[in-house]
Each structure stands twice: as C-alpha cells, then as structure tokens.
Image (tube, rainbow, N blue to C red):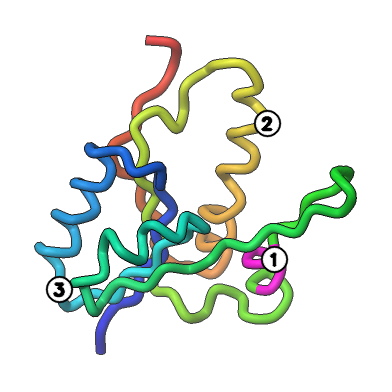
Amino acid sequence: MKKKILVNAYFSQNLGDDLFLKVLFDRYPNVDWYLLTSNTKYNGIFKKYKNVSILKSMSVNFFGIRKIDAFHKINKLLLKYKKYDALLNIGGSIFMEGIGWEEALIKRRVLPDEFNRLKKKSFIIGANFGPF
C-alpha cells in the first residue's frame, strides 16, 4: 500500500523549494504526494508525476471581514485527515522571528498538532529560525 503524504510548503514558484519537491518525487515514486496549495500553476509544474496531486486549499472571504479555510474546516470536522499517513512541512524561513511571528507560529502549528493528536508522523524539512 502506498503511503499518502500531505505536503505544506512554500508554493511560490521558488527554484529552491520546487527543486526540493522534485527531488522528493523522483526519489520516492511509490509515495502519493498531496500538495496543499491553491497556486494552479503547480498543476503544470508537476504534471509529469502521476503520484502528485494538487489540493486547492480553498479559502472563502466574507466581505473582507472573516476568512475561512475550507480545506482545514472540512478535514477537522468530517474527514479528520484520515486519508494521509504523514505531514511534511517544507520551508526555508518558516520560523523567522519577523513582524507577527507569534501569530504565524500559532497558525503553522495547526496541522502538526492535528497529526500528532491522530498519532501520525509530522516532519519539518529545510527550516531555520531566529533573525539570523
């Protein structure tokens, strides 16, 4: 049975991050990768990989007042992330202590905390920290 990995990364067509993903896909062809992005350009970037799926992380904005992330709400309430065997976070500066870093850290913990609660593995690759 193929492992199913949910990938949360920096999806901004950045050479380093995209190359990192390519290396993973090439090295682990027997893993199904699910990329958590709404950037539709990634459909074309990784189209040659049959084991890569792009998840449209849909957000709904109510009159500019409140934004709801439908992917996370549906999984938290109904699906419970059961489809995935593990979570992979990829990013170079995901723990930088810039303006608003505390709020960003709280948001970044949601998925790992959920996977931990379900006793599923969670990995962080390529991260640094601090203002260094």
Quadrant assignment, res 70? bottom right
Q: Amino acid at mark 3?
A: Pro
Give the CA distance from mark 3 to mark 1.
Answer: 29 Å
Q: Quadrant of the N terminus?
A: bottom left
Q: Amino acid at mark 2?
A: Glu
Over which residues does the magenta segment extend? 70-74
Q: Amino acid at mark 1?
A: Ala
Q: Main secondary structure of the magenta part?
A: helix
In this view, 79 is above or below 90: below
Judge whether residue 73 is colored magenta: yes
At horizontal 89% and vertical 44% (from top left) the residue drawn is: 65
Give the CA distance from mark 2 to mark 3.
Answer: 36 Å
At horizontal 45% and vertical 60% (from top left) the residue drawn is: 40
At horizontal 40% and vertical 62% (from top left) the residue drawn is: 35
Residue at which label 2 appears: 103
Q: Residues within 10 Å of mark 2 (few under 14, many from 20)?
A: few
Residue at which label 1 appears: 70
* Viewer-nearest residue: 127 or 26: 26
At horizontal 57% and vertical 45% (from top left) the residue drawn is: 109
Give the CA distance from mark 1 to mark 2.
Answer: 20 Å
Residue at which label 3 appears: 29
